[in-house]
Protein backbone atom coordinates (compact mmCIF):
# COMPACT_ATOMS: atom_id res chain seq x y z
CA UNK A 1 0.00 0.00 0.00
CA UNK A 2 2.82 2.41 0.92
CA UNK A 3 4.49 1.75 -2.43
CA UNK A 4 1.27 2.61 -4.32
CA UNK A 5 0.73 5.83 -2.36
CA UNK A 6 4.37 6.81 -2.89
CA UNK A 7 4.16 6.18 -6.65
CA UNK A 8 0.90 8.14 -6.92
CA UNK A 9 2.30 11.14 -5.05
CA UNK A 10 5.42 11.23 -7.21
CA UNK A 11 3.37 10.93 -10.39
CA UNK A 12 1.17 13.84 -9.33
CA UNK A 13 4.26 15.91 -8.49
CA UNK A 14 5.76 15.17 -11.89
CA UNK A 15 2.54 16.09 -13.72
CA UNK A 16 2.27 19.31 -11.74
CA UNK A 17 5.89 20.27 -12.47
CA UNK A 18 5.36 19.70 -16.20
CA UNK A 19 2.05 21.56 -16.33
CA UNK A 20 3.12 24.52 -14.19
CA UNK A 21 3.80 27.79 -16.08
CA UNK A 22 7.34 27.43 -17.38
CA UNK A 23 7.92 30.82 -18.96
CA UNK A 24 8.16 34.22 -17.32
CA UNK A 25 8.78 35.93 -20.69
CA UNK A 26 7.19 35.50 -24.08
CA UNK A 27 8.33 32.29 -25.74
CA UNK A 28 8.70 33.96 -29.14
CA UNK A 29 10.94 36.64 -27.64
CA UNK A 30 13.04 33.89 -26.08
CA UNK A 31 13.35 32.09 -29.42
CA UNK A 32 14.59 35.29 -31.02
CA UNK A 33 17.13 35.84 -28.26
CA UNK A 34 18.16 32.16 -28.36
CA UNK A 35 19.11 32.42 -32.03
CA UNK A 36 20.96 35.72 -31.60
CA UNK A 37 24.60 36.72 -31.34
CA UNK A 38 24.48 37.40 -27.58
CA UNK A 39 23.36 33.88 -26.71
CA UNK A 40 25.93 32.31 -29.05
CA UNK A 41 28.74 34.25 -27.36
CA UNK A 42 27.74 32.78 -23.96
CA UNK A 43 28.93 35.71 -21.86
CA UNK A 44 29.10 35.01 -18.14
CA UNK A 45 30.88 36.37 -15.05
CA UNK A 46 32.75 34.21 -12.53
CA UNK A 47 34.58 35.03 -9.27
CA UNK A 48 38.22 35.86 -8.71
CA UNK A 49 39.78 35.15 -5.33
CA UNK A 50 38.34 38.33 -3.79
CA UNK A 51 35.24 40.45 -4.28
CA UNK A 52 37.38 43.03 -6.12
CA UNK A 53 38.08 40.50 -8.91
CA UNK A 54 36.00 38.95 -11.68
CA UNK A 55 36.46 36.85 -14.80
CA UNK A 56 34.44 37.76 -17.90
CA UNK A 57 34.19 34.87 -20.37
CA UNK A 58 32.73 34.55 -23.87
CA UNK A 59 33.20 32.79 -27.22
CA UNK A 60 34.18 34.48 -30.47
CA UNK A 61 34.73 33.50 -34.10
CA UNK A 62 38.03 35.32 -34.59
CA UNK A 63 41.41 35.08 -32.91
CA UNK A 64 42.63 38.23 -31.22
CA UNK A 65 42.32 40.35 -28.11
CA UNK A 66 39.15 40.60 -26.06
CA UNK A 67 38.36 43.56 -23.82
CA UNK A 68 35.93 44.27 -21.01
CA UNK A 69 35.08 47.88 -20.23
CA UNK A 70 33.50 48.58 -16.84
CA UNK A 71 31.96 51.94 -15.93
CA UNK A 72 31.37 52.89 -12.32
CA UNK A 73 30.88 56.03 -10.28
CA UNK A 74 34.65 56.65 -10.21
CA UNK A 75 35.20 56.30 -13.94
CA UNK A 76 35.95 53.66 -16.53
CA UNK A 77 38.30 50.66 -16.49
CA UNK A 78 39.27 48.42 -19.41
CA UNK A 79 40.86 44.97 -19.11
CA UNK A 80 42.03 42.66 -21.90
CA UNK A 81 43.18 39.12 -22.66
CA UNK A 82 44.26 37.11 -25.69
CA UNK A 83 41.90 34.51 -27.10
CA UNK A 84 42.52 30.77 -26.89
CA UNK A 85 41.42 28.21 -29.45
CA UNK A 86 38.63 25.80 -28.51
CA UNK A 87 38.20 22.15 -29.53
CA UNK A 88 35.55 23.38 -32.02
CA UNK A 89 38.08 25.60 -33.79
CA UNK A 90 36.72 28.97 -32.68
CA UNK A 91 38.00 31.03 -29.74
CA UNK A 92 37.28 31.78 -26.12
CA UNK A 93 38.11 34.92 -24.18
CA UNK A 94 38.71 34.93 -20.43
CA UNK A 95 39.35 38.47 -19.22
CA UNK A 96 40.48 39.00 -15.63
CA UNK A 97 39.28 42.25 -14.02
CA UNK A 98 40.81 43.39 -10.74
CA UNK A 99 40.94 46.37 -8.41
CA UNK A 100 37.16 46.76 -8.48
CA UNK A 101 35.57 48.89 -5.77
CA UNK A 102 32.21 48.58 -4.03
CA UNK A 103 29.99 49.85 -6.81
CA UNK A 104 27.51 48.94 -9.51
CA UNK A 105 29.35 48.66 -12.81
CA UNK A 106 28.00 48.54 -16.31
CA UNK A 107 30.13 46.37 -18.59
CA UNK A 108 30.55 45.53 -22.27
CA UNK A 109 32.59 42.62 -23.63
CA UNK A 110 34.22 43.17 -27.03
CA UNK A 111 36.21 41.04 -29.44
CA UNK A 112 36.71 40.95 -33.21
CA UNK A 113 33.24 41.19 -34.76
CA UNK A 114 31.40 41.11 -31.41
CA UNK A 115 30.15 43.61 -28.86
CA UNK A 116 27.91 42.38 -26.04
CA UNK A 117 24.83 44.07 -24.68
CA UNK A 118 25.58 46.47 -21.85
CA UNK A 119 24.91 44.71 -18.55
CA UNK A 120 25.47 45.56 -14.90
CA UNK A 121 27.35 43.73 -12.17
CA UNK A 122 27.48 44.74 -8.49
CA UNK A 123 30.63 44.57 -6.38
CA UNK A 124 30.02 44.57 -2.62
CA UNK A 125 32.13 43.28 0.26
CA UNK A 126 29.28 43.46 2.79
CA UNK A 127 28.83 40.37 4.96
CA UNK A 128 25.09 40.26 4.19
CA UNK A 129 24.33 38.71 0.79
CA UNK A 130 22.27 35.93 -0.77
CA UNK A 131 23.17 33.14 -3.19
CA UNK A 132 21.21 30.80 -5.44
CA UNK A 133 22.39 27.21 -4.86
CA UNK A 134 21.51 24.62 -7.50
CA UNK A 135 22.90 21.33 -8.66
CA UNK A 136 22.40 18.87 -11.52
CA UNK A 137 20.80 21.40 -13.85
CA UNK A 138 21.65 18.94 -16.65
CA UNK A 139 21.32 20.93 -19.82
CA UNK A 140 20.90 18.14 -22.38
CA UNK A 141 21.63 18.75 -26.06
CA UNK A 142 20.53 15.24 -27.06
CA UNK A 143 16.93 16.08 -26.05
CA UNK A 144 16.72 18.29 -29.14
CA UNK A 145 16.87 22.05 -29.68
CA UNK A 146 13.37 22.84 -28.44
CA UNK A 147 13.69 20.99 -25.12
CA UNK A 148 17.14 22.44 -24.54
CA UNK A 149 15.84 25.94 -25.22
CA UNK A 150 12.85 25.48 -22.91
CA UNK A 151 14.98 24.02 -20.12
CA UNK A 152 17.37 26.95 -20.43
CA UNK A 153 14.44 29.34 -20.15
CA UNK A 154 13.10 27.55 -17.06
CA UNK A 155 16.51 27.82 -15.44
CA UNK A 156 16.80 31.45 -16.51
CA UNK A 157 13.43 32.26 -14.95
CA UNK A 158 14.61 30.74 -11.66
CA UNK A 159 17.81 32.79 -11.80
CA UNK A 160 15.73 35.92 -12.40
CA UNK A 161 13.40 35.01 -9.52
CA UNK A 162 16.35 34.43 -7.18
CA UNK A 163 17.76 37.82 -8.07
CA UNK A 164 14.58 39.89 -8.10
CA UNK A 165 12.66 38.32 -5.20
CA UNK A 166 15.47 37.18 -2.90
CA UNK A 167 18.31 39.55 -3.78
CA UNK A 168 20.72 36.81 -4.89
CA UNK A 169 23.96 38.15 -6.35
CA UNK A 170 25.86 34.83 -6.53
CA UNK A 171 25.08 31.48 -8.15
CA UNK A 172 26.61 28.34 -6.61
CA UNK A 173 26.32 25.35 -8.94
CA UNK A 174 27.42 22.03 -7.44
CA UNK A 175 28.20 20.31 -10.73
CA UNK A 176 26.57 18.59 -13.69
CA UNK A 177 25.69 21.83 -15.40
CA UNK A 178 25.69 19.67 -18.55
CA UNK A 179 24.76 16.07 -19.31
CA UNK A 180 27.38 15.23 -21.94
CA UNK A 181 29.85 18.04 -21.25
CA UNK A 182 29.07 19.70 -24.58
CA UNK A 183 29.58 23.27 -25.67
CA UNK A 184 25.92 23.85 -26.52
CA UNK A 185 24.92 22.62 -23.06
CA UNK A 186 27.16 25.15 -21.28
CA UNK A 187 25.96 27.85 -23.65
CA UNK A 188 22.39 27.01 -22.60
CA UNK A 189 23.35 27.06 -18.90
CA UNK A 190 24.57 30.69 -19.09
CA UNK A 191 22.04 31.90 -21.66
CA UNK A 192 19.82 33.84 -19.21
CA UNK A 193 20.30 37.65 -19.39
CA UNK A 194 19.78 37.76 -15.60
CA UNK A 195 22.67 35.33 -15.06
CA UNK A 196 24.97 37.80 -16.83
CA UNK A 197 24.31 40.33 -14.07
CA UNK A 198 25.35 37.90 -11.32
CA UNK A 199 28.53 36.03 -10.43
CA UNK A 200 28.46 32.31 -11.23
CA UNK A 201 30.71 29.83 -9.38
CA UNK A 202 30.88 26.40 -11.02
CA UNK A 203 31.88 23.06 -9.54
CA UNK A 204 32.70 20.19 -11.89
CA UNK A 205 30.43 17.12 -11.84
CA UNK A 206 30.86 13.64 -13.26
CA UNK A 207 28.74 14.52 -16.31
CA UNK A 208 30.78 17.65 -16.97
CA UNK A 209 33.84 15.51 -17.59
CA UNK A 210 32.10 13.46 -20.29
CA UNK A 211 33.25 16.06 -22.83
CA UNK A 212 36.17 18.40 -23.32
CA UNK A 213 34.26 21.67 -23.15
CA UNK A 214 34.13 22.30 -19.39
CA UNK A 215 37.94 22.60 -19.42
CA UNK A 216 37.63 25.40 -22.00
CA UNK A 217 34.45 27.00 -20.65
CA UNK A 218 35.25 27.35 -16.93
CA UNK A 219 37.19 30.46 -15.88
CA UNK A 220 38.71 29.78 -12.45
CA UNK A 221 41.04 31.84 -10.26
CA UNK A 222 44.43 30.16 -10.44
CA UNK A 223 45.59 28.22 -7.41
CA UNK A 224 48.79 26.18 -7.46
CA UNK A 225 48.88 23.19 -5.12
CA UNK A 226 50.90 19.96 -5.35
CA UNK A 227 49.11 16.80 -6.37
CA UNK A 228 46.89 15.42 -9.07
CA UNK A 229 44.02 17.41 -10.58
CA UNK A 230 41.21 16.06 -12.74
CA UNK A 231 41.81 16.30 -16.46
CA UNK A 232 38.91 18.75 -16.96
CA UNK A 233 38.78 20.66 -13.66
CA UNK A 234 40.41 21.48 -10.35
CA UNK A 235 39.85 22.98 -6.91
CA UNK A 236 39.66 26.74 -6.40
CA UNK A 237 38.55 29.20 -3.73
CA UNK A 238 37.07 32.66 -3.42
CA UNK A 239 35.89 34.96 -0.64
CA UNK A 240 32.65 36.92 -0.62
CA UNK A 241 31.62 38.88 2.45
CA UNK A 242 32.80 36.87 5.45
CA UNK A 243 32.58 33.50 3.69
CA UNK A 244 35.40 31.39 2.26
CA UNK A 245 33.99 29.23 -0.54
CA UNK A 246 36.06 26.11 -1.27
CA UNK A 247 35.08 24.68 -4.66
CA UNK A 248 36.30 21.07 -4.60
CA UNK A 249 36.52 18.80 -7.65
CA UNK A 250 35.25 15.54 -6.17
CA UNK A 251 35.88 13.69 -9.46
CA UNK A 252 39.54 13.67 -8.46
CA UNK A 253 40.22 11.06 -5.75
CA UNK A 254 43.61 12.51 -4.69
CA UNK A 255 42.73 13.37 -1.07
CA UNK A 256 46.25 14.63 -0.39
CA UNK A 257 45.92 17.24 -3.15
CA UNK A 258 42.54 18.34 -1.78
CA UNK A 259 44.06 18.66 1.69
CA UNK A 260 46.92 20.81 0.43
CA UNK A 261 44.45 23.00 -1.46
CA UNK A 262 42.21 23.47 1.57
CA UNK A 263 45.16 24.12 3.87
CA UNK A 264 46.52 26.80 1.54
CA UNK A 265 43.12 28.48 1.13
CA UNK A 266 42.31 28.44 4.86
CA UNK A 267 45.72 29.76 5.90
CA UNK A 268 45.40 32.63 3.40
CA UNK A 269 41.95 33.46 4.80
CA UNK A 270 42.16 32.37 8.43
CA UNK A 271 40.21 35.39 9.68
CA UNK A 272 37.19 34.71 7.43
CA UNK A 273 34.34 33.56 9.67
CA UNK A 274 32.47 31.01 7.55
CA UNK A 275 33.84 28.09 5.53
CA UNK A 276 31.59 26.53 2.90
CA UNK A 277 32.61 23.65 0.62
CA UNK A 278 30.84 23.14 -2.72
CA UNK A 279 31.45 19.77 -4.39
CA UNK A 280 29.44 17.44 -6.58
CA UNK A 281 29.32 14.06 -4.87
CA UNK A 282 26.87 13.39 -2.05
CA UNK A 283 28.37 11.83 1.08
CA UNK A 284 25.60 11.07 3.59
CA UNK A 285 22.22 11.28 1.85
CA UNK A 286 21.68 7.68 0.90
CA UNK A 287 18.69 7.07 -1.40
CA UNK A 288 20.84 5.23 -3.99
CA UNK A 289 21.80 1.90 -2.44
CA UNK A 290 24.00 0.87 -5.38
CA UNK A 291 26.24 3.89 -4.73
CA UNK A 292 26.76 3.31 -1.03
CA UNK A 293 30.12 1.59 -1.53
CA UNK A 294 31.31 4.63 -3.48
CA UNK A 295 29.96 6.93 -0.77
CA UNK A 296 31.86 5.04 1.94
CA UNK A 297 35.10 5.62 0.06
CA UNK A 298 34.27 9.29 -0.47
CA UNK A 299 33.49 9.73 3.22
CA UNK A 300 36.82 8.10 4.07
CA UNK A 301 38.62 10.71 1.94
CA UNK A 302 36.60 13.88 2.53
CA UNK A 303 35.10 13.83 6.04
CA UNK A 304 38.51 14.07 7.79
CA UNK A 305 39.22 17.18 5.67
CA UNK A 306 35.95 18.86 6.68
CA UNK A 307 36.79 18.12 10.33
CA UNK A 308 40.42 19.25 10.10
CA UNK A 309 39.57 22.57 8.45
CA UNK A 310 36.46 23.19 10.55
CA UNK A 311 34.04 23.50 7.62
CA UNK A 312 30.60 24.81 8.55
CA UNK A 313 28.55 23.67 5.55
CA UNK A 314 29.09 21.29 2.62
CA UNK A 315 26.86 21.73 -0.46
CA UNK A 316 26.61 18.75 -2.80
CA UNK A 317 24.48 17.12 -5.51
CA UNK A 318 24.84 13.97 -7.65
CA UNK A 319 22.14 11.80 -6.11
CA UNK A 320 19.27 14.08 -7.29
CA UNK A 321 17.59 13.60 -3.88
CA UNK A 322 17.21 16.35 -1.28
CA UNK A 323 18.70 15.65 2.17
CA UNK A 324 20.29 17.60 5.00
CA UNK A 325 22.46 15.84 7.57
CA UNK A 326 22.74 16.01 11.30
CA UNK A 327 25.74 17.92 12.64
CA UNK A 328 28.58 15.50 11.89
CA UNK A 329 32.14 15.26 13.19
CA UNK A 330 34.41 12.26 12.92
CA UNK A 331 31.74 10.57 10.83
CA UNK A 332 29.23 10.49 13.70
CA UNK A 333 26.26 12.70 14.56
CA UNK A 334 27.17 15.14 17.34
CA UNK A 335 23.70 16.72 17.16
CA UNK A 336 20.59 15.24 15.59
CA UNK A 337 18.71 17.90 13.64
CA UNK A 338 15.39 16.16 13.02
CA UNK A 339 12.65 18.61 14.01
CA UNK A 340 15.10 21.49 14.47
CA UNK A 341 14.90 24.73 12.49
CA UNK A 342 18.36 25.92 13.54
CA UNK A 343 21.64 24.97 15.19
CA UNK A 344 23.96 27.29 17.10
CA UNK A 345 27.75 27.00 17.44
CA UNK A 346 27.59 23.46 16.11
CA UNK A 347 30.36 20.99 16.94
CA UNK A 348 30.79 19.70 13.39
CA UNK A 349 29.56 20.15 9.82
CA UNK A 350 26.18 20.17 8.11
CA UNK A 351 26.17 18.24 4.81
CA UNK A 352 23.41 19.29 2.43
CA UNK A 353 22.46 17.66 -0.86
CA UNK A 354 20.04 19.59 -3.02
CA UNK A 355 17.67 17.73 -5.27
CA UNK A 356 18.39 18.18 -8.96
CA UNK A 357 17.14 21.33 -10.67
CA UNK A 358 15.86 19.25 -13.54
CA UNK A 359 12.92 16.89 -12.96
CA UNK A 360 14.03 14.01 -10.75
CA UNK A 361 13.25 11.06 -12.99
CA UNK A 362 14.82 8.70 -10.45
CA UNK A 363 12.10 9.61 -7.97
CA UNK A 364 9.40 9.63 -10.62
CA UNK A 365 10.26 6.14 -11.82
CA UNK A 366 10.81 4.57 -8.40
CA UNK A 367 8.18 2.09 -7.19
CA UNK A 368 9.17 2.31 -3.54
CA UNK A 369 10.64 4.80 -1.09
CA UNK A 370 14.44 4.61 -1.44
CA UNK A 371 16.31 4.24 1.87
CA UNK A 372 17.88 7.25 3.59
CA UNK A 373 21.36 7.45 5.06
CA UNK A 374 21.35 7.00 8.85
CA UNK A 375 22.84 10.46 9.53
CA UNK A 376 20.14 12.45 7.72
CA UNK A 377 18.24 15.00 9.79
CA UNK A 378 15.78 16.13 7.11
CA UNK A 379 14.74 14.93 3.67
CA UNK A 380 12.20 15.97 1.04
CA UNK A 381 11.12 13.50 -1.60
CA UNK A 382 9.74 14.96 -4.84
CA UNK A 383 9.98 14.52 -8.59
CA UNK A 384 10.04 18.29 -9.05
CA UNK A 385 13.19 20.29 -9.60
CA UNK A 386 14.63 22.13 -6.57
CA UNK A 387 16.53 25.36 -5.95
CA UNK A 388 17.80 26.96 -2.75
CA UNK A 389 18.38 30.47 -1.45
CA UNK A 390 21.26 30.85 1.01
CA UNK A 391 21.25 34.11 2.96
CA UNK A 392 24.58 34.89 4.62
CA UNK A 393 25.05 37.36 7.46
CA UNK A 394 27.64 38.02 10.13
CA UNK A 395 26.27 35.42 12.54
CA UNK A 396 24.14 33.07 10.46
CA UNK A 397 23.52 31.17 7.24
CA UNK A 398 19.82 30.79 6.46
CA UNK A 399 18.86 28.08 3.96
CA UNK A 400 15.48 28.19 2.20
CA UNK A 401 14.62 25.41 -0.23
CA UNK A 402 11.92 25.52 -2.93
CA UNK A 403 10.51 23.39 -5.68
CA UNK A 404 10.82 25.10 -9.07
CA UNK A 405 7.06 25.70 -9.21
CA UNK A 406 6.66 26.53 -5.52
CA UNK A 407 6.20 29.98 -4.02
CA UNK A 408 6.84 29.04 -0.39
CA UNK A 409 9.91 27.15 0.89
CA UNK A 410 9.37 23.52 1.84
CA UNK A 411 12.30 23.83 4.27
CA UNK A 412 13.96 26.61 6.25
CA UNK A 413 17.03 25.97 8.32
CA UNK A 414 19.57 28.32 9.96
CA UNK A 415 23.14 27.72 11.03
CA UNK A 416 24.14 30.25 13.70
CA UNK A 417 27.63 31.02 14.94
CA UNK A 418 28.42 33.61 17.59
CA UNK A 419 31.61 32.13 19.03
CA UNK A 420 35.05 32.86 17.62
CA UNK A 421 36.61 30.16 15.49
CA UNK A 422 39.38 28.18 17.21
CA UNK A 423 42.88 28.64 15.74
CA UNK A 424 43.72 26.14 13.01
CA UNK A 425 45.89 23.33 14.34
CA UNK A 426 47.31 21.05 11.68
CA UNK A 427 47.87 17.49 12.85
CA UNK A 428 49.64 14.58 11.16
CA UNK A 429 47.13 12.29 9.49
CA UNK A 430 46.42 8.98 11.26
CA UNK A 431 48.28 6.06 9.69
CA UNK A 432 45.13 4.64 8.09
CA UNK A 433 44.24 8.02 6.56
CA UNK A 434 47.76 8.58 5.26
CA UNK A 435 47.59 5.17 3.58
CA UNK A 436 44.19 6.04 2.09
CA UNK A 437 45.57 9.30 0.67
CA UNK A 438 48.50 7.47 -0.93
CA UNK A 439 46.17 4.98 -2.58
CA UNK A 440 43.86 7.81 -3.68
CA UNK A 441 46.74 9.53 -5.50
CA UNK A 442 47.51 6.37 -7.48
CA UNK A 443 43.80 6.06 -8.30
CA UNK A 444 43.75 9.69 -9.48
CA UNK A 445 46.58 9.04 -11.95
CA UNK A 446 44.83 6.07 -13.54
CA UNK A 447 41.53 7.94 -13.47
CA UNK A 448 43.07 10.82 -15.43
CA UNK A 449 44.79 8.59 -17.98
CA UNK A 450 41.53 6.73 -18.65
CA UNK A 451 39.58 9.99 -18.98
CA UNK A 452 42.17 11.58 -21.27
CA UNK A 453 42.18 8.49 -23.48
CA UNK A 454 38.39 8.54 -23.70
CA UNK A 455 38.31 12.23 -24.63
CA UNK A 456 41.07 11.73 -27.17
CA UNK A 457 39.11 8.97 -28.87
CA UNK A 458 35.69 10.62 -28.69
CA UNK A 459 36.61 14.31 -29.13
CA UNK A 460 39.84 14.07 -31.10
CA UNK A 461 41.84 16.02 -28.50
CA UNK A 462 45.61 16.06 -28.71
CA UNK A 463 46.74 15.26 -25.17
CA UNK A 464 50.33 14.95 -23.99
CA UNK A 465 51.28 12.45 -21.29
CA UNK A 466 51.97 15.11 -18.64
CA UNK A 467 48.45 16.49 -19.08
CA UNK A 468 47.02 13.00 -18.96
CA UNK A 469 48.75 12.20 -15.68
CA UNK A 470 48.64 15.50 -13.79
CA UNK A 471 45.37 16.84 -15.19
CA UNK A 472 44.09 20.39 -15.32
CA UNK A 473 46.58 23.01 -14.13
CA UNK A 474 44.89 26.26 -15.14
Image: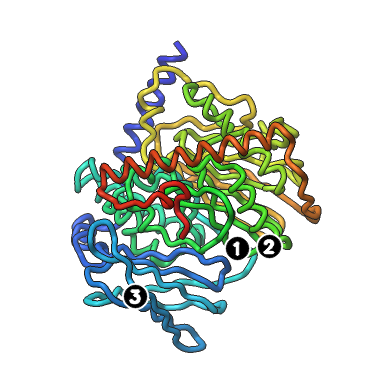
Q: CB of mark 2 within 8 Å of CB of mark 1?
A: yes
Q: Is residue 346 visible?
A: yes
- Considering the numbered disc 1 on the image, is that residue within a helix, a strand or a loop? strand
Q: Position of residue 439 (x, y in %)?
A: 58, 35
Query: How many angstroms separate mark 2 from mark 3 (CA)?
Result: 31 Å
Residue at position x 45%, y 50% in the image: 471
Q: Position of residue 469 (x, y in %)?
A: 45, 46
Q: Position of residue 412 (x, y in %)?
A: 59, 43
- Considering the numbered disc 2 on the image, is that residue within a helix, a strand or a loop? loop
Q: Is residue 337 above or below residue 131?
A: above
Q: Position of residue 294 (x, y in %)?
A: 52, 29
Residue annotated with mark 2: 269
Q: Residues within 10 Å of mark 2 (few under 14, many from 20)?
A: some
Nearest the eye: 216 or 113: 216
Residue at position x 60%, y 63% in the image: 239
Query: How many angstroms separate mark 2 from mark 1 (CA)?
Result: 8 Å
Q: Residues within 10 Å of mark 1 (few under 14, many from 20)?
A: many
Q: Is residue 21 visible?
A: no
Q: CB of mark 3 within 8 Å of CB of mark 1?
A: no
Residue at position x 63%, y 46% in the image: 313
Residue furthest top as drawn: 1
- Tell which tag, 2 or 3, sits nearer the viewer: 2
Nearest the eye: 342 or 172: 172
**Sequence-wise, which precedes: disc 2 or disc 3?**
3
In the image, taking residue 113 as reference, residue 423 lies left or right, namely: right
In the image, taking residue 213 as reference, residue 97 lies left or right, namely: right
Would you identify the image quadrant in which residue 130 lies? bottom right
Residue annotated with mark 1: 239
- Tell which tag, 2 or 1, sits nearer the viewer: 2
Residue annotated with mark 3: 109
Amino acid sequence: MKRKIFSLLLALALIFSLSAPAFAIDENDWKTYWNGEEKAASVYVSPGHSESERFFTWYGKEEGEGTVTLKGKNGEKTFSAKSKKTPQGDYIYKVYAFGLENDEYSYICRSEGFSSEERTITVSDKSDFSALYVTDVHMTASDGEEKLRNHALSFGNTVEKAKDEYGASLILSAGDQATKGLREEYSAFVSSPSLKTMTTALSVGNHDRKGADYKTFAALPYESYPGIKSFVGRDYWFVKGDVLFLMVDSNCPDAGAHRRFMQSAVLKNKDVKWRVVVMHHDLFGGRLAHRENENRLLRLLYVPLMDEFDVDLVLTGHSHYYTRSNVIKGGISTLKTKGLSSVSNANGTIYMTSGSFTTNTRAAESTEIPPLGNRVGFDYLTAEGIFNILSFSENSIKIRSFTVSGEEPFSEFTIEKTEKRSPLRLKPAPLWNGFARSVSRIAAVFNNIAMADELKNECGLEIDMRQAIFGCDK
